[in-house]
């Protein structure tokens, strides 16, 4: 264990334990906090390296493809059958964005044990609340089932049929789908939107530019689309109870602005890409989203209403018990039994994407829990407009729910400042994969359409336009 003059008995050190440093500049304050607790700098450095890794993940994937190709060529030259390259598989693993924060959490564990000892480290990891990652795993698994997606597709078709083929589907999914996030939760809305876009849009082979524009638009729309209510968007959930925000407050201050921004951004992108979207309309969508293991000749439209209603019931239970993992995880166990009993009407339940997304979010929660030492004073020192901008920018590098959670720890925030920080957090939620909890779900379901992986820079550019529209809606109206 590293000997230090002041090793905290618990990490992170409580913000209230730092002395009053109101007379210092923000830079002096942060330097003083590092002097008092050196592990602050260590944890933030590891977090910064993890973020840098997410931006480099595509490079790892591309290099893995080259290594595998070279490995295959050597085997062919030697007259041997092709086999997976261990080096290529390791590089592919390093290129999995969902695994990045979990991998760097291992580094964090080692650093914390070396600095503060085993007992302090185990207390930190044991005391973390993993409710959000667990919830996302369950709701994503439920929302991706055949009855739910078939029901969502049939419901959205009623709207899309008014406008024709692909352009109408594209508009409907990207406008109506994200707004559903205010009722079925943002992770559920993201899962359904991503699955429907895969079938009705991405499978048709759009240009790379339109692919990224659609992905960026989806991420931004889902991030702000959950603000019509006080119980569905993770960044809103963090503040609704301590700040006393209810349904009428959310609709009056956030909801109508978010809905307007979603409509304006989506129509603007449709106008920009209308020629390509119209050209895609002549192509047929994939025949079925699912390949059930046992269908007995049933089509995707033959799922009995009672099966669909039961699935909806399980989703409703999960949403209602979102704060109680013992209840919604228990409900999910019962659902798995129901899905097995109704196998002819189900697709194979693939738990890998939800589990990877949960692993990603758990890693982000682990790292984010140690960043309050600098985020809280930064938020607390800013005026309203700079606070909005800071929340938007910080969200791109940290889950927006963590930003709003830390904002609840800042004393004496006025109502306008509270609104500004939440507006900034949801506005920046589409800029990166790590900015909003549902984004990894969308990334996991759609990354196969982007070659070696989703480029963070291209995603940022695709989301920039809708983000600026959201800025205008929240701050100018």
Image: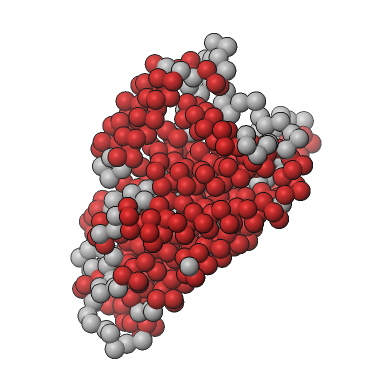
Residue at the (34%, 35%) spot, across then down = 316
* 255 over 309 or under it: above or below: below
Query: Which one is nearer the viewer's eye here, 80 or 230?
Result: 230
Query: Which one is nearer the viewer's eye here, 110 or 300?
Result: 300
* 384 over 350 or under it: above or below: below
Residue at the extreme bottom of the image, as rendered: 23
Q: Position of residue 213 (x, y in %)?
A: 64, 53
Q: Position of residue 409 (x, y in %)?
A: 27, 67
Query: Which one is nearer the viewer's eye here, 2 or 406?
Result: 406
Q: Position of residue 374 (x, y in %)?
A: 36, 72
Residue at the (44%, 46%) spot, across then down = 181
Query: Which one is nearer the viewer's eye here, 419 or 338?
Result: 419
* 308 over 392 or under it: above or below: above
**Total number of numbered labels?**
0
Please name the colour scheme applied to the rendered image.
secondary structure
Q: Position of residue 235 (x, y in %)?
A: 37, 57
- From where the camera sits, is residue 330 visible? yes
Residue at the (55%, 21%) spot, across then down = 301
Q: Is residue 104 left or right of residue 265?
A: left
Residue at the (74%, 40%) spot, across then down = 280
């Amino acid at each position: 264990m590293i000997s230090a003059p002041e090793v905290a008995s618990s990490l992170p050190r409580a913000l209230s334990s730092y002395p009053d440093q109101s007379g210092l500049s923000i830079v002096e304050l942060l330097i003083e906090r590092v002097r008092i607790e050196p592990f602050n700098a260590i944890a933030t450095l590891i977090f910064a390296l993890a973020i840098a890794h997410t931006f480099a993940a595509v490079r790892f994937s591309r290099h893995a493809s080259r290594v595998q190709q070279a490995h295959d060529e050597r085997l062919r030259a030697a007259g041997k059958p092709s086999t997976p390259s261990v080096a290529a598989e390791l590089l592919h693993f390093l290129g999995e964005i969902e695994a990045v924060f979990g991998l760097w959490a291992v580094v964090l564990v080692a650093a914390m044990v070396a600095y503060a000892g085993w007992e302090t480290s185990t207390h930190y990891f044991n005391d973390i609340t993993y409710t959000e990652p667990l919830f996302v795993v369950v709701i994503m698994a439920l929302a991706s089932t055949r009855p739910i997606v078939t029901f969502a597709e049939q419901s959205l078709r009623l709207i899309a049929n008014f406008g024709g083929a692909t352009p109408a589907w594209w508009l409907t999914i990207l406008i109506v789908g994200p707004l559903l996030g205010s009722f079925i939760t943002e992770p559920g809305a993201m899962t359904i939107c991503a699955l429907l876009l895969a079938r009705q849009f991405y499978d048709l082979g759009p240009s790379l530019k339109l692919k990224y524009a659609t992905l960026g638009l989806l991420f931004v729309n889902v991030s702000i689309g959950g603000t019509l209510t006080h119980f569905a968007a993770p960044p809103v959930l963090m503040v609704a109870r301590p700040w006393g925000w209810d349904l009428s407050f959310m609709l009056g201050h956030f909801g109508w602005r978010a809905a307007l921004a979603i409509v304006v951004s989506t129509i603007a992108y449709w106008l920009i890409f209308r020629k390509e979207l119209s050209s895609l309309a002549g192509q047929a969508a994939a025949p079925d989203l699912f390949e059930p293991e046992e269908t007995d000749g049933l089509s995707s439209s033959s799922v009995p209403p009672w099966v669909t209603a039961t699935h909806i019931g399980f989703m409703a239970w999960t949403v209602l018990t979102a704060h109680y993992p013992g209840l919604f995880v228990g409900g999910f166990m019962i659902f798995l039994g129901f899905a097995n009993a109704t196998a002819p009407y189900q697709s194979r339940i693939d738990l890998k994407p939800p589990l990877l997304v949960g692993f990603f979010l758990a890693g982000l929660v682990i790292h984010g829990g140690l960043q309050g030492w600098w985020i809280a004073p930064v938020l607390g020192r800013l005026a309203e407009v700079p606070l909005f901008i800071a929340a938007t920018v910080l969200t791109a590098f940290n889950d927006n729910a963590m930003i709003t959670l830390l904002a609840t720890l800042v004393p004496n925030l006025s109502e306008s400042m509270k609104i500004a920080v939440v507006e900034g957090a949801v506005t920046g939620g589409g800029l990166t994969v790590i900015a909003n909890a549902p984004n990894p779900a969308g990334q996991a379901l759609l990354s196969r359409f982007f070659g070696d992986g989703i480029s963070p820079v291209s995603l940022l550019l695709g989301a920039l336009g809708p983000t600026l529209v959201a800025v205008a809606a929240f701050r100018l109206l």
